[in-house]
Image (tube, rainbow, N blue to C red):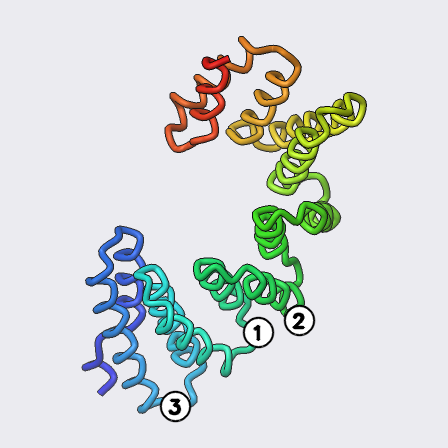
Amino acid sequence: MLNEIETPEILNNIGVIQVELKKMPEALLSFQAALSSVNKILKLTPDSKKFKALNITIRFNLAYHHEQTNNLAEAVELYNDILKEEPLYIDIYYRKAAIAKKRGDYMKAVEYLEKAKKTPSNRAPVNQMLTLALLYQEMGDTQKAGEEFIAVQKIAGLKEPYANLGIANLDYERSTQVRHEEKKQEEKMRRAMKMYMETLELDPSNAFATLGLANIMAEHGKIQDAVKIYSVLKDTLPGCSHSYVNLAIMHAS
C-alpha cells in the first residue's frame, strides 16, 4: 500500500526548487501533492515521527509559498496551525514578523521577534537579534537597535560582521546629526570607521562597509577618493542604490 503512494519528500523538494526558480504555480501543486501524499501515509502509520515532522515541514513550505505570493491570510493561518503543534518552531515567529512588517505593523513584528529570542530552544538567537536590530533602525529607534547589535557582539564576539556593520552605520548616522558639534561628530565618525574596518577584516567583500568608509572620506573632504569607491560599487554592484545616490551628490557638488 505504501509503495503506491508518491514519495512526499521528493514532491516537497521539487516544490522548494520551484519556489527558488520563481515557478510559483508549479510549486503550489508540488506542495499540495506532497501534503496529500504524507497525509495518506500518516493514516496508515499514525505514530510515525518521521512523517509527522515531514507533514509540518511541508505545511511550513506551503505557508511560505502563500507568503511569497502575497496570500498573507492563508500563510498566517497555516503558520498558526503549526505553532499549535510545535510552539518552539522559531522560524515561524520570524516569518510572522516578516508578514507583520509587510502589513506595516512594525510593533507586531517586534513582538514576534522578541518571542523568537525568548523561545527556550533558541540557544543562540543571533539571526533574530540582527533582524530585530535592523527593524528598530528602520523604525528610527537607534538606541534599541544599538542595544541589539551590542548583544549580538556579546554572543558572537567581535567576529559577527553584520553586528559590526550595524553599529558602524548607527555611529555614522549619529555623526551626521551632530555636524554642528565638530568634536562629537569626529568621535562618532572615528568609531564608525573602526567598526567598518573590523567588518572588512572579517568580510573583505562587504560592499556596505566599503560604502560606509567612502561616506566618511567624503565627510573629511576626500571627495576624489570617495567618488572612486562609489564608482567601483556602482559598476560591481548595480543593486547598491546608495552608491548611485552618493555619486550623484558628489558630481552635483
Up/down of 209 relative to 36, above or below: above
Given residues 141 and 190, the one toward you in this image is 141
90 w.r.t. 78: above or below = above
Q: Which residue is mark 3?
A: 46
What is the distance, in whole Å, between disc 2 and disc 3 at their CAs? 28 Å
Instruction: Pinpoint residue 53: horizontal percent, then vertical percent.
Output: 43, 76
List the single residue furthest toward the right.
183
SS of the residue under disc 1? loop
Q: Which of the two residues, 23 or 48, is positioned nearer the viewer here?
A: 23
Mark 1–mark 2 distance (CA, rounded to whole Å) = 7 Å
Direction from residue 229 to residue 64 in the image, left or right: left
Viewer-side residue, 253 vs 245? 253
Percent from the top left, x then y, of residue 50?
A: 42, 78
Q: Are marks 1 and 2 in contact (CB under 8 Å)?
A: yes
Callout 2 touching callout 3 (CB < 8 Å): no
Name the disc covering residue 40, or none: none
Disc ID at residue 120 = 2
Q: Please rate how many residues cluster around mark 1, counting C-alpha atoms within 10 Å: few if below 14, some from 14 to 19, many from 20.
A: some
The structure residue drawn at horizontal position 60% and vertical position 41%, both measured from the top left corner, is: 162
The quadrant where residue 195 appears: top right
Asked if residue 202 lies left or right of residue 62, the reply is: right
Q: Residue at x 74, y 29 (%)?
A: 188
Q: Earlier in the sequence, mark 1 or mark 3?
A: 3
> Closer to the camera: disc 1 or disc 3?
1
Circle 1 is placed at which residue position?
88
* Crowd around label 2: few <14 · some 14–19 · many ≥20 (10 Å): few
Residue 252 lies, in percent from the top left, at: 46, 14
Amino acid tagged 3: Pro
Q: Are marks 1 and 3 in contact (CB under 8 Å)?
A: no
Q: Residue at x 62, y 16 (%)?
A: 217
Quarter of the image containing the N terminus?
bottom left
